[in-house]
Image: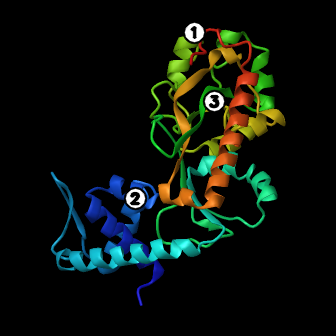
Amino acid sequence: MVAPTHLRSLQALDAALRYGSLAAAADRLSITPAAVGQRIKVLEDYLGVDLLTRGRSGLSPTPAVGPTVDRLRTAFRELEAVAEALNLQRGHEIHLAALTDVAELWLKPRLHRFRAQHPNILFCINGEGEAPLRLGSVDCEISFGQAADEPNRDLLFEDFIIPIGSPENVRRIAGTVERDRLEGFPLLHLDFYKDDSAAPGWADWVRVQGFHRTSPERGMRFQRIAPVLEAVRADAGLTLCGLALIGEGLDDGTLSLPFPLSTGCWTEHAFQARFRPDALARPQVRRFRHWLAEEARTTRNWLELRLEGSRNAVGITR
């Protein structure tokens, strides 16, 4: 019997060959391109041969896997048909794929309110939860990117980028001349927003705001929001971060704003939820979609209230 790890690797291989690229396969499987590549590499290491080659027309099989492509494709088409048929038996399950930061910082802390209304609905988020991981596409995918007007895609909320610090570090720099507050102070760099042209890095922010800071591009880099917030709370430095996912930290006082809201800016990208059309035929998914929209509205209202009075200030644009 093929081990489950190899089954997932074979699934990634089939998707990469079927759709011609790791990115397209990742979109189909609701995982990242890096995860697709890693699953295939696990199988290549196990077999001791390369399985894919890259050409002008995309990915193609190596001679080692070529004779098995048709059988692999047939097998997974049959498995997809079985998964689709079994989807009717999922009952009160909802399967989600969400950015880890969105799941940890925004979705999971709110999910108890949905469960209070619908205690019989079980969740599987990024492969974990009360419901078991199943083969096939997820019911809903929550991402951060360029807003797109598509059927079954809901815009949840945009984000507002501004410097964030711990209360202790905000107190430390408060007594200095404002333009010199960052000189010699550690800056933490967050790459979560790097693909959004409206989201500034430290070098851009320092230049636009007219602050003095030698080599603002230096400092520790973080890919995700949650780890950089841990560093901020540990007084390791300041970071540029969006407010949308960190409202709890600001409200409870574990995070602070070292500079006025007028130094922040809105993102061009937005957090969005995309629902699989056939999943919306199930009432529990429709209920979750409605609940998600209400929670997103609450976050938008929180942002607007916090920024009230600063809409026309320098640096705040929409």
Disc 2 to disc 1, C-alpha distance: 45 Å
Whether 222 is drawn above or below 80: the answer is: above
Whether 115 is drawn above or below 135: the answer is: above
Earlier in the chain: of badge 2 and badge 1, it is: 2
Q: What element carries label 2?
A: helix
Q: Going 68% across and 49% down the picture, which residue do you hit?
A: 107
Indicate which label's residue lies in the foreground, 1 or 3: 1
**Which residue, given by chain and number where applicable, does mark 1 sit on?**
210
- Residue 138: give its label: none
Indicate which label's residue lies in the foreground, 2 or 3: 2
Residue closest to the eye, 166 or 27: 27
Give amino acid for label 2.
Arg
Q: Is residue 266 left or right of residue 106?
A: left
Q: What element carries label 1?
A: loop
The residue positioned farthest toward the right in the image shown: 252
- For disc 3, the neighbor class at 10 Å (few under 14, some 14 to 19, many from 20) is some
Q: What element carries label 3?
A: loop
| Image coordinates for residue 182, horizontal then vertical, percent | 64, 20
Earlier in the chain: of badge 2 and badge 3, it is: 2
**Which residue, given by chain and number where applicable, does mark 2 sit on?**
28
- Residue 186: give its label: 3
Q: Going 62% across and 66% down the picture, which residue do you hit?
A: 128
Residue closest to the eye, 261 or 94: 94
| Image coordinates for residue 79, horizontal then vertical, percent | 40, 77
- For disc 2, the neighbor class at 10 Å (few under 14, some 14 to 19, many from 20) is some
Give amino acid for label 1.
Gly
